[in-house]
């Protein structure tokens, strides 16, 4: 997500970019220049970000997605596959909305804390979800399931993006 810093400024929560001269951070992620932002700074930003702002940050419309893919020489070759995948995700989300499931996962009442913890780990694993945790909103924008938006750790989000 190279554009993360630009989008963060829309919410007024962009971490201050500071970099000592000559240092490079091995833990810098999602930035074109890895020495600008560290994982710790990004984690702090994410944990302080309200739920609504997280939803807005992790939402992309069809036009923007295809425009970014067109600019990327690697993605432009698979434009048809990208379009098919996007359409299938939107159709899957609409079928869930018609069933009344939505993007929330049902809570299981009457289960032990240990069982809930293991289910939470499973819920935050993109491999157990159709489309790797990607979902679509009612207006057809691509986003993530709420269990990933609400994740405390960015490692969970990184797993979603790595497997997408």
Image (cartoon, rainbow, N blue to C red):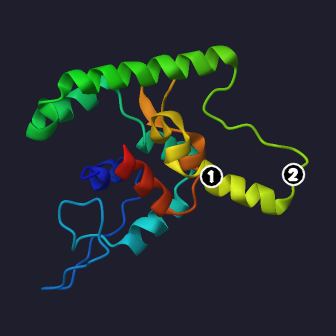
Is 52 located above or below residue 46 in the figure?
A: above
Residue 140, how many percent across, how many down? 44, 20
- The residue located at (79%, 57%) in the rendering is 115
In this rendered view, identify the residue nearer to me: 155 or 44: 155
The quadrant of the picture occupied by the C terminus is top left
Residue 46, how many percent across, how many down? 48, 60
In this rendered view, identify the residue nearer to me: 142 or 10: 142
Decide: few, some or many residues near mark 2? Use Cα within 10 Å; few <14, some 14-19, many ≥20. few
Q: Which residue is mark 1?
A: 122
In this rendered view, identify the residue nearer to me: 48 or 125: 125
- The residue located at (40%, 54%) in the rendering is 12
Q: Which residue is mark 2?
A: 111
Residue 105, how many percent across, how many down? 68, 38
- The residue located at (32%, 75%) in the rendering is 27
- The residue located at (26%, 76%) in the rendering is 18
Q: Earlier in the sequence, mark 2 or mark 1?
A: 2
Query: Residue 66, located in which quarter of the rendered image?
Result: top left
The reply to whether residue 140 is visible in this rendering is: no
Residue 101, how many percent across, how many down? 68, 26
């Amino acid at each position: 997500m190279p554009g993360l810093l630009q989008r963060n400024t829309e919410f007024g929560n962009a971490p201050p970019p500071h970099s000592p001269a000559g240092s490079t951070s091995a833990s810098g992620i999602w930035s074109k220049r890895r020495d600008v932002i560290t994982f710790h700074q990004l984690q702090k930003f994410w944990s302080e970000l309200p739920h609504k702002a997280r939803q807005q940050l992790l939402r992309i419309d069809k036009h923007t997605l295809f425009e970014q893919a067109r600019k990327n020489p690697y993605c432009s070759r698979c434009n048809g596959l990208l379009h098919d995948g996007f359409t299938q995700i939107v159709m899957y989300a609409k079928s869930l909305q018609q069933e009344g499931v939505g993007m929330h996962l049902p809570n299981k009442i009457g289960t032990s804390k240990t069982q809930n913890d293991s289910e939470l780990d499973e819920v935050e694993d993109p491999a157990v979800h159709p489309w790797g945790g990607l979902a679509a909103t009612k207006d057809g924008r691509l986003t993530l399931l709420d269990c990933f938006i609400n994740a405390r750790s960015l490692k969970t989000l990184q797993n979603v993006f790595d497997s997408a």
